Amino acid sequence: MSSLYARHALLPQGWASNVRLHWNEHGDLIQIEHDASLQAHGHEYEQQAQWVLPGMSNLHSHAFQRAMAGMTEMAGLAGEGKDSFWTWRDLMYRYALHITPEQILAIAAQLYAECLRHGYTAVCEFHYLHRNQEGSFYARPAEMAERVIAAAEQTGMGISMLPVLYSYADFGEQALRHDQRRFSTNVEEILQLIAALEGKRNAQVEVGVAPHSLRAASISQIRELVAALPVERPIHIHIAEQQKEVDACIAYSGKRPVELLLDSDLLNQRWCLVHATHLNKAEVQGIAASGAVAGICTTTEGNLGDGFFDLPDYIAAGGRFGIGSDSHVSQSPVEELRWLEYGQRLRLQGRNIAGTPAQRKVGDFLYQAALQGGAQASGRKLGQLKVGYRADIVVLDDAHPNLAGIDSTDVLNTWIFAGNDNLVRDVYVGGQQVVQDGKHLRQAEIRAAYAECMRSLRAL
Ligand code: ZN
């Protein structure tokens, strides 16, 4: 099949009726037919769908953390002190130290299959498990990254692989801790990793880079890295996730993290600032003016107690944003977008926060904005049902009672804000169907490999 007839499709200009999407053998959309009619082939009608949307980019993922989702929710984990992001991170490191190349493939495949079932069709993989358990490079230095890409290929997920530069334990170029040995890289090593992955690039796979944070990489390193990278590649960084990080940055440099990055004159549309939770008004304006994307990971930020992104001021400034599932306590774009809005309602004690005068439907605004921001952060042609873009398509379940008799302009609000059933029925990535009737087509084998992996990891 290289076409799909949609009763209703979400096009860049809004919902349209009677649309036929055509794509070529490479998975790129080549024609959008308007006012089309359903074609009969003998007694059979062509494949059709009621509600068709562009698939969502998941702009921030650490795939291996899927294996520990749900395992750290116990008061007193930190002993006497307060449970926090930092005590969670110690537990996460313990997991990270054990994962083998075979296991990261199994975990990432399970994760990506779940993400696809919920409507994500691309992922930006912020990948920092480079070295083996002892802290040496594998015989193939890109081994772990290659396994993650293999998981994307196995599941059909589009991927932007972002090898992570991780050189220091904290501001001031402090030496890495022993339990950070698997992440250890300098600029030269990251450029070698990227070079080793060049042959993997294709219509489904892009390779960018990610300086981990201003804690783990210095501005001069980042400058050197960016200068050596091809100009179109995406660059992601964690920033201002925790107040402690902001305080440490000020103590070190006299500046807040986003301020420091803005003053470096490095930021532009290639950048994704992951979290960007703790911002002052000037930083909100600065990110928006730079054209960079804010990578908001609401469920993880909620899980880790990070804080609230300043969404209304950022939207008012014309800021771009997308969503990521980060630690994978959720694999659903619906939950990310719902809690992005609900967090703001709780914070501001008001309703209907996300929107503009041009788009007052909260769900439509959030979904469209996250499509655009996620696509930009991926460095790939995604997020629009438009000629030249990938045929990444989500079909909603028109048999679900929530969508019975609904007007197209209420579909996104209903999907995002009503109930917890997964309304995604079918998913196509690059024109290839990967989810049918709510099931990933390779679900059984992926789940079996994951279950075996988890039996050994849970025995740790
Ligand atoms: Zn992260």
Image (tube, rainbow, N blue to C red):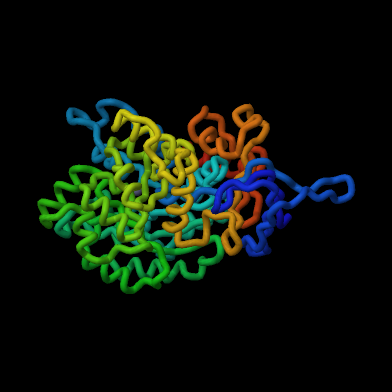
Nearest the eye: 341 or 113: 341
- The answer to whether residue 301 of the structure is visible from this angle is yes
Looking at the picture, does residue 338 appear above or below residue 445?
Answer: above
Residue 300, located in which quarter of the rendered image?
A: top left
The percent coordinates of residue 210 (x first, y second) are 34, 59
> How far across and down, in percent of the image, does residue 249 sit?
16, 52
**In the image, 419: left or right of 28?**
left
Location of residue 44 with respect to 458 vertically, above or below: below
- Image position of 241 with respect to 80: above or below: below
In the rendered view, would you say 160 is above or below 458? below
Q: Quadrant of the N terminus?
A: bottom right
On screen, residue 289 versus residue 7, left or right, reads left
- Residue 57: % across, % down: 48, 51
Count the numbered circles shown. Answer: 0
Residue 213, horizontal then vertical, whole percent: 27, 55
Give the camera-side residue of 425 and 405: 405
* Residue in view at x 20 percent, y 47 percent: 245
Residue sitting at 33 percent across and 64 percent down? 268
Residue 215 visible in the displayed image: no
Q: Residue furthest right?
A: 42
Q: Is residue 355 left or right of residue 187?
A: right
Image quarter in which the C terminus is found? top left
Residue at left 57%, top 61%? Answer: 389
Residue at figure coordinates x 18%, y 30% from the top left: 81
In the shown orientation, is residue 409 left or right of residue 329? right
Query: Toward which corner of the image does residue 27 lie, by quadrant?
Result: bottom right
